[in-house]
Amino acid sequence: MTLFLHSGIVISQENVDDESTVVYPASYFAEWSPVTAQDMLDRIPGLDMGSMSSFSRSSRGSSRSSGRGSSGGSGGRGFGGGNRAIEILINGKRTAGKNNSTDRQLSRIISSQVDRIEIIRGTSGDLDVRGSGQVINVVLYEELSAASLQYDFGAEHSPDNTIKPRAEVSYNGQIGGLGFQTSVRGYDPLFYTQSREYSMLGDFSPNDEIREIRRRDPRGGGFSTNFDYEINSRSSARFNATWTEGTHTSDTRRTTTDLKVVPNLNTYQLETAPGIYKNWEIGGDYELNTESGSRWKVLFISNSLESGDTRERFDILGENSKSKNLFLDSWSETKERILRGSYTFDIFVGQDLEIGAERAQTILNSKLALGISSDSGIPSPSVGGLVPMPILNANSTVEEIRYEPFVIHNWVFNPRTSLETSILYEDSEITQKGDVAKQRSFSFIKPKLDFRYDL
């Protein structure tokens, strides 16, 4: 069930108008009766949603980032160098955020606020991103009333007949030159799966059968907010923040049937894995346009992601009897702080140059504890009463400090043809402390050419 009460929001937009831009007016989507800007985007043919920057179709539940230097949320290192297939802008601006990025705002924008959606395949110094395959610019109406309120309530029915609620409330408004979007959400889904696995020996005789029933129940909530302030006709600032916190419980019931003996022998196991998830982020940017047409811009991000779970496995010995044989506790916290500044100016007709630098700090703290059931060794309460096992590099802190100056030259030959040339220099130092101490540094130059001809 979804309820809506809306009127509008006021934000200015400067259109990017050339032959490499495909425009979808709001009237194009009328036959599908879209509710949000995301619904409108879903109806544009040829868009690969999986290629969108930090794209997430749902705020329920959580996922962990992975990969070298991944921050406390989605995306890769730093603000990114425009390597994504699709970037999303709102009124020509990109949000200085990862977890609370521009594409996540689409589900909070009422469709009646959207004037048009532009698909930009060319390059231009006027764009807030460089080097992407396509840029989606969602343009909002300039003259709408002051506020919109959106409710989204729902329930999910799982295979074991459990019903779980979810809710999100969003409020958008405009006060003078200040536009804002705020949303509060809560989630309590249930994931229930059953599986069956057979295995055989090398001579193709039956080995065993494993049947599992998995149940995972995350629950939590959070809020997101975005502010856009037009200071005057030449300068503007944006600020965004997001916070999410939740817990999850999970259990797996496993039945293993030994098919090598007659009669077949069943063994039973139970695994539990309660855990936590915490994530916050703040980000912002300031932009100043001079009388000569040049542009100064400063962006920053600070975020943190903490997650952990404790896995315990038991052998079921009887109806009211079980024996623990495994304890595995893992915890990690990833923090990232980024500062980026740039200056863009025209050098000749159809040509502009952007000069800037980015400084980033990424910190990963991790801990791991393992205990097993063993006749040798001394049991410890720190590993659930089992015997602790030594693990190489179980406790560590890894920090990367990165400096990245860059120069980007953009040359628009005509409405169909453009060339973007960039040179990026990266200097990075990675330090590890804890059970293992290491340090290394590296630097490299990354040139890039991006030539585009619109057929």
Image (spheres, grey):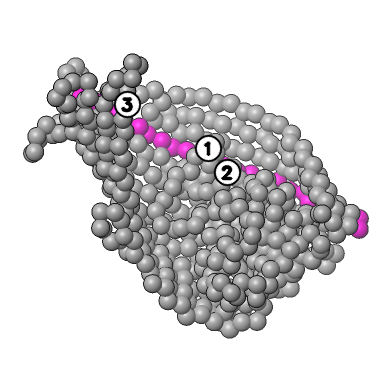
In the rendered view, would you say 45 is above or below 141? Answer: above
Which tag is nearer the camera, tag 2 or tag 3? 3
CB under 8 Å between callouts 1 and 2? Answer: yes
CB under 8 Å between callouts 2 and 3? Answer: no
Query: What is the CA distance from the residue labelled 2 to the residue labelled 3?
Result: 39 Å
Q: Position of residue 233 (x, y in %)?
A: 74, 73
For the magenta stretch, what is the residue range? 347-373
Q: Position of residue 77 (x, y in %)?
A: 59, 42
Identified by mark 3, the residue type is: Ser
Residue 213 or residue 442, whichever sits in front? 213
Mark 1 and mark 2 lie on one chain; the one further toward the N terminus is 1
Query: What is the CA distance from the residue labelled 1 to the residue labelled 3?
Result: 33 Å
Residue 380 or residue 164, whichever sits in front? 164
Extreme front residue here?
204
Residue 369 in the magenta stretch? The answer is: yes
Residue topped by disc 3: 199
In the image, taking residue 356 as reference, residue 152 lies left or right, namely: left
Q: Report the residue at 35% width, 36% height from top.
A: 330
- Count of residue discs: 3
Helix, strand or loop at disc 2? loop
Residue topped by disc 1: 67
